[in-house]
Each structure stands twice: as C-alpha cells, then as structure tokens.
Image (cartoon, rainbow, N blue to C red):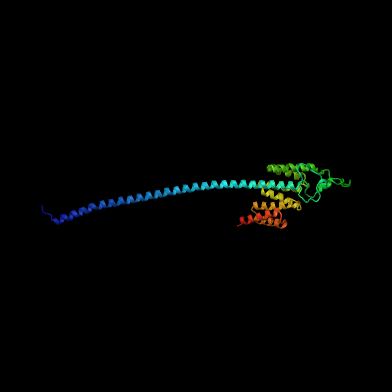
Amino acid sequence: MSKIPTRFLCAAALAAAVAFAAPAHAQRESLAERVARLEQQQGGSQGSVELVNQINALQSQVQQLQGQNEELRHQLDQLKQQVRDQAIDVDSRVSKLEGKPSGSAPSAANAPANSGQLQDIALGGGAAAAASNTAPPPAAAPPAPSAPPANPADEKTAYDQAFAALKDGRYAESAKMFQGFLAQYPNGDLAPNAYYWLGESYYVTQNYPISLDAFNKLLAQYPNSQKASAALLKVGYCQYELKQWDQAETTLNQVVAKYPGTQEANLAQGRLRALKLERR
C-alpha cells in the first residue's frame, strides 16, 4: 500500500469540512428567513386587528352621534310645535281682545260705532248684518227659495264650534268644521276669518300646500279683510316651508311694503333674515 502524501490528506479534510458546513449555513439562513417571515406575518396580523378595532370604535361613535342627532331633531320638532301652538294661542287671544266677547252675539245696532277693530263675529262685507236691519225686499225680487238667508246666530254658533276645536288642538276636526262652515256660509260675515283659521289648522299640522291654498283664497276673495295682512304673511311662511325661496322673498317683501310698522311687517323682516341664511 502506497503512502498518501500529507498535503493531499489535508486538502481532502478541508474540502470535506467545507462541504459539511455549507448545508448547515444554508439551513441556518433558511430558519432565519422563516422567523423573519413569521414576524412579518405576526406584525401584519396585529395591524389588521388594530385596524378592525379602530373601525369598530368609529362605528360606535357614529351610532352615538346618530342617536344624539335624532334626539336633537326630536327636541327641535317639539320646539317648533310649541311655537306654532303659542302662535295660535296668541292670535286667538288678540282676536278676542279686538273682537266681541264670545258669550254673546250682539246685533250691529249695539256694536260700537267706528271702532275700526277686528271683530271675530262681524267681518267681511257686512251684507248679512245689513240685510238683517233692512226692510224685506219688494215682491218683484223675492229671495231664491233654494238659498234662504243665513241665520246670524246659527252662523256664529258653527264658527265658534270650529274655532273652539282649533284652540283645543283638534286641528283635523277644526279643519273639517271650517270647511263645512264655508260650504254652508260662503258669503257670511265670518267667511274671511274662517278661511284664515282653516289655513292655520293646516299650517300647524305642516300641510303647507293646503294651508297656502286657504290663505290665497282669503286674499283673492277678501283682499280688504282685517285678516289680509296676517294671511299674506302666512302665505310667505308657507312658501318658506315649501322651500319656494324666490316666492317667499317676494311675498314677505310685499308684507313689509304694504303693512309698514305692523307686527306682520316685523315678523316678515325676521323671516327674511332667516331666508338669507337658508340660501347662503
């Protein structure tokens, strides 16, 4: 057996060592890469969990804000209803102060002369009141059998019942009664007031198109009524609620120009300021 030189043995041993170390190093790098990937995955999972938590927190905040918004909206609706109720109450009180006591229906002869005040039971052209104090018509022109003259006492009773329903907050019933009153007494002295309170009954219940129609009928048929200024103001209010901005502005400016210095003019100016804010 020949003797192998020492240098060849050393070279073979070094090569074997290198060959053995290479897979171990490769294995160590593979483990390191796997650990790095696991750490990255874990970090990504933690980020996803945090994102989900943030989304849940935001959803909870949105729900809370929605609940607060609904509560504030409910409170606002209640305040609007209170304002409307107070407006009707004030208007009815003013009508009582300016008119006659509701407990009696004195004739025109007993009414104060030239009072110039709104009288809740003697409005309009005064045709019925005048007819009750004049002689019967001549035989050549008898009244039509199908249209007998209205009884002022019955007219006042029907009007008072409808007005009482309005003051009690029975708005739907009041509207129906005022409609029946106008159908029965279309030319009565109380027709202008009936149209006005009919419009109010619909305005309070936010039936603005029907309310607008009632106020417009009052202005068309009784332009010189004591309720004309208030009716014109309410026309502007209805147009405002219906977001008919241009029409509302025109109507409210008419109130200011036609009835300067009145309460209606002051209210119209306030609504015009609100209208500017709405249209900004």
Q: Quadrant of residue 270?
A: bottom right
Please tell me which residue lies in front, 130 or 8. 130
Residue visible at 50% across and 48% down? 61
Identify the residue at the far left of this view: 1
Please tell me which residue lies in front, 132 or 183. 132
Establish if 244 lies above or below 78.
below
Q: Position of residue 225 (x, y in %)?
A: 76, 51
| Residue 259 appears left or right of 19 | right
Picture quarter with the C terminus: bottom right
Establish if 247 lies above or below 168.
below
Q: Position of residue 164 (x, y in %)?
A: 72, 42
| Residue 51 appears left or right of 264 | left
Answer yes or no: is residue 194 visible.
no
Please tell me which residue lies in front, 130 or 178. 130
Answer yes or no: is residue 273 visible.
yes
Q: Position of residue 22 (x, y in %)?
A: 25, 53
Image mark count: 0
